[in-house]
Amino acid sequence: MIHCLSRRRALAAAAALTFGALAALAPAPAYAQTALDDVLAKKVINIAIPTDFPPYGFVGTDLKPQGLDIDMANYIGAKLGVKVELVPVTSANRIPYLQTKKADLVISTLGKNAEREKVIDFTAAYSPFFQAVFANKSLPIKGAGDLAGKTVGVTRGAIEDIELTKIAPASADIKRFEDNNATVAAFVSGQVQVLATGASVAGNMMGRNPNLGAEYKFVLKDSPNFIGVAKGEDKLRLRVNEIIAAAKAAGDLDKMAVKWLGRPAGELP
């Protein structure tokens, strides 16, 4: 009797192991793509945006969020025919907000890289993020060669410093400052004729000092922004891609970029 029970237990254990092995080999259940349907059913979409990163997202004098990312969020909501609930986020919590469904989309100067692609999905790019050269409208600067004989302010060791150093003519007088505030102050006070900096820094400066007559001249390095979507939510991602493609064809992406960055969106991946 004891021998019989032992044999039954062994057979049961073997069956359990076999079942477990088969279960491990079975494909995972299909992800329920409900985000788009939920948004359309509720007539509301929650979009994470920045409020401390002008000109992409910041709080205006009326205490309401504004900027390129906010315009894009409202544009997508309008095309979907739903109300937009703006969800302020920081660089640190924007992806967790998407993963925990506090936001349906993240439109917050989000760059795409391999590490992020492991945890979230991305739409097509919707706006440029770039380091560029800026100067007064009266200065005829279209490329690196036009910097010859001019004083150029840049933040020491920044991406724009590295890129500028590669292409600036020998006669360009590059003055390096220790941080962005000092670099911008040098341009605003007239210590330098030309400013090489990031789009967000330049946009903030031009917004605060319209009397300078500064404008975008040419790009040093492009790093476009993408919209973040929860992993596996392909229906929502593809619908947003359709909206972005139509906006690009209609020139609406260029209009938003010119409004906030001083240059068209141009070619985006």
Image (tube, helix red, strand yellow):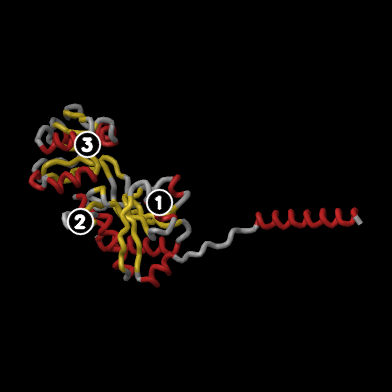
Q: Say which quarter of the image contains residue 184.
A: top left
In the shown orientation, is residue 94 left or right of residue 67? right
Amino acid identity at mark 1: Ile
Task: Give the mark, 1 or 3, whose residue is nearer the N terminus.
Answer: 1
**Is mark 1 in CB contact (under 8 Å) with mark 3?**
no
- Judge whether 30 appears above or below 17 on screen: below
- What's the CA distance linking mark 1 and mark 3? 27 Å
Extreme residue toward the front, this view: 2
What's the mark number on residue 118? Answer: none
Q: Which numbered marker is on residue 63?
A: 2
Identify the image quadrant of the N terminus.
Answer: bottom right
Helix, strand or loop status at disc 3: helix
Q: What residue do we see at 14% from left, 31% from top?
A: 151
Q: Could you tell me how far apart the alpha carbons at marks 2 and 3 are, in whole angstroms?
A: 25 Å
- Toward which corner of the image does residue 197 lie, by quadrant? top left
- Of label 1 and label 2, which has the lower sequence position? 2
Amino acid found under the numbered disc labelled 3: Asn
- Residue 95: image tag: 1
Q: Classify mark 2: residues with Cα within 10 Å, few (<14), some (14-19) or many (20+).
A: few
Q: Is residue 248 visible?
A: no
Q: Which mark is residue 180?
A: 3
Percent of width and height locating residue 50: 29, 52
